[in-house]
Amino acid sequence: METFTLHEMLINSTDLNQILCNFGINISECQSEQEPSPETKVCLPLLSDINQTVRIILYSLIFLLSVLGNSLIIGVLVRNRRMRTVTNLFLLSLSISDLMVSLFCIPFTLIPNLMRDFIFGTGTCKLVMYFMGVSVCVSTFNLVAISLERYSAICNPLTSRTWQTKSHAAKVITATWVVSFILMLPYPISSNLKPFTRYNNSTGYMCRLVWPNDVIQQSWYVCLLLMLFLIPGIIMMTAYGLICVELYRGISFELSSRKSIRERQSSTGSIKPGDSDGCYMQQSKRKSITGGGGSSSIKPKAERVCSSSSTANLMAKKRVIRMLLVIVFLFFLCWTPIFVVNAWQAFDRRSAYRLTGAPISYIHLLSYTSACVNPIIYCFMNKRFRQGMLATFTCCSCLRSSGGLGRSAGSGTAKGELGRLRAGPKTPEQNGHTPPSGANTHFTYTGIRPSAWSELT
């Protein structure tokens, strides 16, 4: 077995530190390290090129997904008046703020990080830093507002009817933007270009917040940690946790009700064992005409009508619970690293410099991922939104492709098809059937408004 002396281990450690420095890690110790070995000098440019290529690809991918996703949501909600519900107004505000995150945060984080220089000037530095803070603040506040609105609609459906209106939602959204612009005023005031010496002895500039003293800096980052991460995270966790509890109780209640109905029907002999599949016998009357005197007679006929609404409701509730858990998990996953690093830099700047370069770039990228994740979770996983998006773009394509009388006829046909698509399959009640007792007891436990439920699923 090959052994190493202490001197060789120290040399290897020095080479490792130099590799980390050139790779963007452990920069605080780079100035005091010795010259790397010839083998290290050959590998370093390759590692640096791979690192920059990976960062460029990831940042570009997140940027494109976020811009396309949020722009699509904004276009659908603006063009389709029927989708302008209370929840969708908050989603519209969330999409605008996430689009701002994509446009102001991603390019102005990646480009200076790769060039090791902020080349856009002092004015752009102040403006970009300001809109970075505003977009993140509005996005977080919108997530909190959506969680509270959904909690009120599901857990307190009767009291929420009185105040959950579009005008109230517009007031809350306006207040959110105004408060965010006010809270983030320290960014343009304190932002400035800070010079530093690069490895080739040239001067570069960083767009940084310059505070009068460490106490103010620490107080600012602690306030951000509380206002934009801890308190919103606790509120979202509590609201969605209570929603999950309410839905779970509804699932338990519905399962017990179905079990008791099956037991009662099997004891009375109204159904046979194995017939508890949600189907029931419906008497339908058919008119038959005899040939001679033209007399007609009505013959009743038993038909088997199946309704899977109960099973579908249970599956939908379980799906909503999983989605709410994913929302809370992704919020903490995306935002925990950046807020922890900011607080770390405020209280221990020297040790936090180890994260300068590639690590802080990837941490920022993780936080920006929320801008492309939010549209997927809140909109594209929603069946009603997908149907509305299909209706919006189908109507647009029909209006473009048809003209004159054909245009009106084609649009009428398209509207009829889209109306049937939005309405979905008819229930037994809409077809004129009357389900047996106990089959129409869905949602009587939770009392969820149909609009609130459809916006969740």
Image: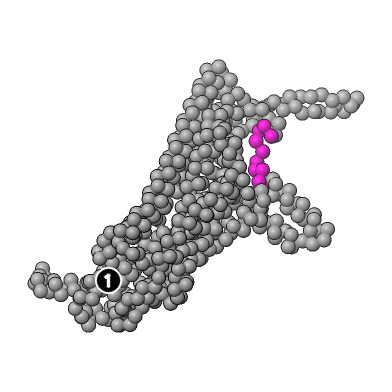
Query: Of helix, strand and loop, which mostly describes the magenta segment?
Result: loop
Q: Is residue 181 above or below residue 435?
A: below
Q: Is residue 273 above or below residue 242?
A: above
- Measuring from the top left, give residue 133's x and y in whole percent: 45, 60
Q: Residues within 10 Å of mark 1 (few under 14, many from 20)?
A: some
Q: Quadrant of the N terminus?
A: bottom left
- Measuring from the top left, give residue 117's x and y in whole percent: 38, 76
Residue 168 in sight:
yes
- Measuring from the top left, give residue 125's x and y in whole percent: 44, 70
Q: Which residues are magenta?
A: 421-430
Residue at image point 13% right, 71% down: 9
- Left or right of 191: which side holds 350? left
- Measuring from the top left, give residue 87's x and y in whole percent: 56, 46
Q: Is residue 280 above or below residue 240?
A: above
> Which residue position is annotated with label 1?
27
Nearer to us in this view, 22 or 389: 22
User: Which residue type carries mark 1?
Assistant: Ile
Residue at image point 37% right, 62% down: 363
Q: Is residue 161 magenta?
A: no
